[in-house]
Amino acid sequence: MDVHYQLAKNPQPNIFPYTMRKTHTTPPLPPLNALRAFEAAYRHSNITRAAAELGVTQGAVSKQIKLLEDFYGAALFKRSHQKMTPTAKAAALFSVVHSALENIRSVTRKIKGTASAREQLIISCLPSLSTQWLTPFITRFQKRYPSISIHVLAGDGAPDFDSGEYDLAIRSSTHPAWKKLHSQKLMSERLVLAGSPTLFKRTPLTKPGDIKVHTLLKHTTRPELWEWWLAKQKVEIAKPKYSIGFEHFFMLIEAAKRGMGVALLPEFLVAPSLADGTLTAPLSEKYISKSPYEYYLLTTPTKAKRPVVQSFRKWLATELQTQG
């Protein structure tokens, strides 16, 4: 008998009762690499810096962002030669993607539990402070907190926490007005007149007036320092002898060590050089002058909640208090 005739005469029960039931499909997710490229580009507002962070070419980052824009069918950045400006849709996406990637990194550190997954703390610091002052503190901090990895970036001017490049910033100011930031005063600035021992042996400097015969090393970022100090000491010089100008204090310190002239330097920066004898402060303590500048440790309210940031802020405050 024909099998088709039998099936038609005696219909069989449906042995796959659920195959015709409608299902709800999960929307596809964008590629992870595209999200990583977008997140880095958003933080830096710059393709070059994003590529450097990810260890890929600029073209690769641009390609991934274009892939993401095609996926969403919307532009995520307004591009110019110097900068990438995120759109409103990009801002909404970034808040979610950044949080998700941070959570993934955090869980990864906990699961791996290895030295390679140490907590990271990035500090933006004035160039001279990073080389002359901060380094010894970091050495001691890492002995106390070996699980925290510290990276120091040179930076001056107003801190840009929106870039996402660092957690803390050390800056100086005469009129601190750090709006919407957590600020912690580190110290005031006292200026010391210093030069090489050979220079002062050749041309003694025992009182402020003796400065008239010396060459003055000038800080180009703070050109008013000498005028301020001379006025404070009531010394008048018709035509001060200025040497080459230097942008940073650490440059002034090196020039002074080489006998190129006399420099006005923050006491806490020059202390190691005075201690090892490579520089001398010829005038007495009463001629050390407090300047209008103060130094601050800055962070955002959000970053201030991070345990690693809290640990460093508390530890540094204790260290400075101990040093007096």
Image (cartoon, rainbow, N blue to C red):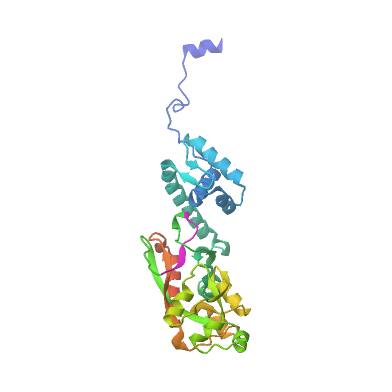
Instruction: Please check the rendered image and state whether residue 171 is part of the magenta-colored stretch, yes or no.
Output: yes
Left or right of residue 184, residue 217 in this image: right
Residue 277 appears in view: no
Q: Tell me: residue 230, above or below residue 222.
A: below
Residue 300 in the image: state x and y as whole percent.
Answer: 40, 61
Q: How many marks?
A: 0
Instruction: Please check the rendered image and state whether residue 239 is part of the magenta-colored stretch, yes or no.
Output: no
Which residue range is magenta in the image?
Answer: 163-173
Which quarter of the figure is the C terminus placed in? bottom left
Of 124 and 307, nearer the camera is 124
Which quarter of the figure is the N terminus placed in? top right
Residue 32 in the image: state x and y as whole percent.
Answer: 53, 44
Of 203 and 176, nearer the camera is 203
Q: Residue at x 38, y 65 (%)?
A: 182
Q: Residue at x 53, y 76 (%)?
A: 240
Q: Residue at x 38, y 62 (%)?
A: 181
Residue 166 in the image: state x and y as whole percent.
Answer: 49, 60
